[in-house]
């Protein structure tokens, strides 16, 4: 069965739109874009479009590539103190002369719609409710829940340990009482670990789940998205091989990508301050 992210994301966006209508105040997402990175510009434009569709006000703050770190931190402080702004997102990557961690740490945890600040990450890790869960893993959990895929007691294997996907994904699956194995580029006998997965989440960015190495009837979530040698968008999983054995599988495109946007809009519709 295909985990249809396009379909489920539409459903989530509809419910976010309804919630926004009933909220009584309009959420306002401020998106900071530093420099001229073409891909970042497209991501930011798509976020603005999605926000408009669900009734969330959005403002893109375009800053020069040469902005100093101090000035960027000052801009964030202004947004933290601006009562009209309910969510702040800094589009990554940032230019090299700016310390990404310092910038993320400057965002108020109650406006941190990406869920990347130490307070939100820490809350997730110690079992407190974070103000915001990171969008991609939250979107994956929403997708699994929509298809009633059991998580409790399952063996979950995650490929990739990034701060935006792998690590928060592990925390969120642990919270739901899965037994979690995290794999990365130093993991030995990767294939043996993949074979144990009832739920396999792959967030690597290369074709890594290749042949019939997955467990029968397992659930495969492909987070990776990149272009193959022919320029075609593809994911980490060799869909044709793996789909014979898997019970559930998310396609690329049309799986985790649209769920991430829907999950981000879910976050942007929350108003704390
Ligand atoms: P990332 O920062 O690109 O890091 C990749 C991870 O894969 C690292 O943890 C790395 O291990 C691990 N890795 C590399 N080679 C490996 C190997 N041979 N075996 C096992 N693990 C290996 O991760 P990311 O930012 O999470 O991105 C991963 C992919 O997901 C990319 O294609 C990205 O475009 C995609 N993505 C998609 C969405 C979406 O919404 N669809 C959202 C976020 C990311 P080390 O830590 O040891 O280097």
Image (cartoon, rainbow, N blue to C red):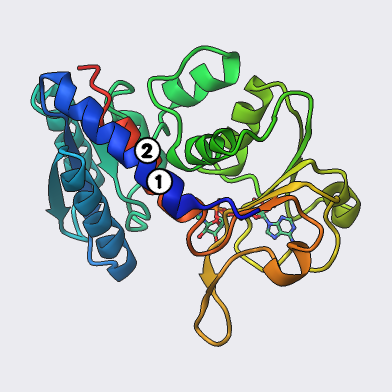
Give x and y (percent) for residue 211. 82, 68
* Rendered residue at 51%/12% (across/down): 128
Q: Which structural element holds mark 1?
A: helix
What residue does disc 2 label? 12
Give x and y (percent) for residue 227. 52, 76
Compare residues 87 and 260 and report the one nearer the observer. 260
* Rendered residue at 26%/51% (across/down): 47
Compare residues 201 and 31 and report the one nearer the observer. 201
Q: In 3D space, how far apart are the residues under numbered discs 2 and 1 (Cα atoms)?
A: 5 Å
* Rendered residue at 23%/30% (across/down): 18
Does residue 99 show up? Answer: no
Q: Residues within 10 Å of mark 2 (few under 14, many from 20)?
A: some
What residue does disc 1 label? 9
Pointers 2 and 1 in contact (C-beta within 8 Å): yes
Compare residues 186 and 257 and report the one nearer the observer. 257
- In the displayed structure image, the side of residue 137 where residue 269 appears, left or right: left
């Amino acid at each position: 069965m295909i985990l249809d992210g396009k379909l489920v994301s539409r459903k989530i966006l509809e419910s976010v739109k309804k919630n926004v209508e009933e909220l009584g105040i309009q959420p306002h997402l401020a998106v900071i874009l530093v420099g001229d990175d073409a891909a970042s510009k497209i991501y930011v434009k798509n976020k603005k479009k999605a926000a408009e569709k669900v009734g969330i006000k959005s403002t893109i703050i375009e800053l020069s590539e040469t902005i100093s770190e101090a000035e960027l931190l000052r801009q964030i402080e202004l947004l933290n103190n601006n009562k009209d702004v309910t969510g702040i997102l800094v589009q990554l990557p940032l230019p090299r002369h700016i310390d990404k961690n310092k910038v993320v740490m400057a965002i108020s945890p109650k406006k941190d719609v990406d869920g990347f600040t130490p307070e939100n990450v820490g809350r997730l890790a110690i079992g407190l409710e974070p103000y915001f869960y990171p969008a991609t893993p939250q979107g994956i959990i929403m997708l699994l829940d929509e298809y009633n895929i059991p998580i409790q007691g399952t063996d979950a294997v995650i490929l990739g340990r990034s701060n935006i996907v792998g690590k928060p994904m592990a925390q969120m699956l642990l919270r739901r009482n899965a037994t979690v194995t995290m794999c990365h580029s130093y993991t030995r006998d990767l294939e043996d670990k993949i074979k144990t997965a009832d739920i396999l989440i792959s967030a690597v960015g290369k074709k890594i789940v290749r042949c019939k190495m997955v467990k029968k009837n397992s659930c495969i979530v492909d987070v990776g998205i990149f272009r193959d040698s022919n320029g075609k968008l593809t994911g980490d999983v060799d869909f044709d091989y793996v789909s014979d054995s898997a019970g559930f599988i998310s396609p690329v495109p049309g799986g985790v990508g649209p769920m991430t946007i829907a999950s981000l809009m879910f976050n942007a519709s929350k108003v704390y301050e």
